[in-house]
Image (cartoon, rainbow, N blue to C red):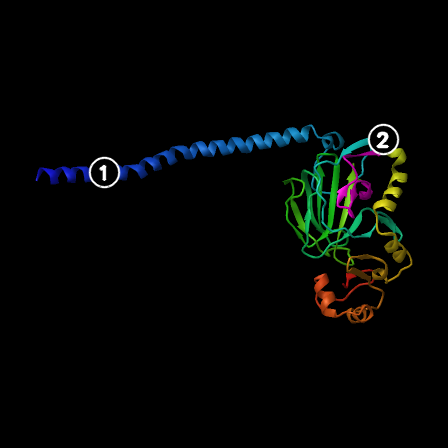
Amino acid sequence: MQFKKTIKTLALTAVMALATVPAAAQDLLARQAPVDKKLKAVDTLALRELIQREQAGAPSAQLYKDWNNRYAHRATELPDSFSINLKHFCMPTSSRIITSNFGSRWGRMHKGLDIKVYIGDTIRAAFDGKVRIVRYEANGYGNYVVIRHNNGLETIYGHMSKHLVAENEQVRAGDPIGLGGNTGRSTGSHLHFETRLCGVALNPALMFDFRNQDVTGDTYLFRKESYNRESLAATRQRGKNDDLAAANDNNSNNIGDNVESGDVRYHKVAKGETLAAIARKRGTTIDKICKLNHISKNMRVKPGQILRYS
């Protein structure tokens, strides 16, 4: 009888002990929660302070007197020379195909590079920085983003189908900022990419080599006295393929005859051409052209538009 009583006592003690473990654990978690919250707040504050210190010591702080979200660009006085750090970069797109160079085009100045992308392709921030503008412009950039970078540059990404960032947001090189598109004043899906210093457009080919998916060096030294000469040289070296340039200069629509990358070929739409006419000329089908370019069969193609057909 005494043995049974002892067993019951031990069992009851064990049950009570087990019951207290979760309660103790809950008490520990309850005590830990405010600590975790404080640590998180400290981490966030430390990160903000680190970003503020980086920005305060960044070259961009020396170049720009104000910060606002009203204008895409406003030219101010350029320094005689300025060293732009190109380290820790990311190419805005993995596309290697330049469809239009920086410089005079159709009687006006084209202030960036046009890079062939498809609707929905990911567009990324070129360097660390802060998003200054996120906007839509019907007669110009379409959906576009302007980022002010710590190295002093501002970059503009135009004609996107969608924004993926907000104004005043901090971004790191490589962060997705939008999707490729054909919005605004555009004759086919592409990325219009600009690099500006003090609001003045500089030739992106001086800093970015899209064909090789790389930058031109660790730094680019801008010099007023030699910029024009260097810009022309950069276009010859890293701009649109010479055969493609010749085809454009002659208003040709036979780009695919000259520009190839493996089995990838392109056609420049001539006035009056339709998808059916292009398919016949290139020995392919409308379905294939539509699939390669992510377009519908009823879409009206425009003169000057670049279409992939193989």
Residue 296's disc is none
Residue 207: % across, % down = 79, 40
Residue 193: % across, % down = 76, 47
Q: Quadrant of residue 305?
A: bottom right
Q: Which residue is mark 1?
A: 14
First-in-chain label (2 vs 1) = 1
Res. 108 visible in picture: yes
Tell me the quarter of the image containing the C terminus: bottom right
Whether residue 203 is in magenta: the answer is yes
Residue at left offset 70%, top offset 64%: 291
Whether residue 277 is in magenta: the answer is no
Give the residue type that dot 2 points to. Answer: Asp
Q: Quadrant of residue 150?
A: top right
Asked whether, in this view, residue 157 is left or right of residue 5, the answer is right
Please provide the residue range marked out in magenta.
201-222
User: Badges 2 and 1: C-beta atoms under 8 Å apart?
Assistant: no
Of circles 2 and 1, which is in front? 1
Q: Secondary structure at mark 1?
A: helix
Residue at left offset 89%, top offset 43%: 232
Q: Is residue 113 above or below residue 18?
A: below
Asked whether 85 or 168 is in front, the reply is 85
Question: Quick one: label 2, few (<14), some, or many (20+) residues within 10 Å?
Answer: few
Residue 6: % across, % down = 14, 37
Q: Secondary structure at mark 2?
A: loop
Res. 306 visible in picture: no
Give the residue type that dot 1 points to. Answer: Ala
Residue 80's disc is 2
Marks 2 and 1, Cα distance to the nearest angstrom?
82 Å
Residue 264: % across, % down = 77, 59
Tell me the quarter of the image containing the N terminus: top left
Asked whether, in this view, residue 46 is left or right of residue 184, the answer is left
Asked whether 239 or 103 is in front, the reply is 239
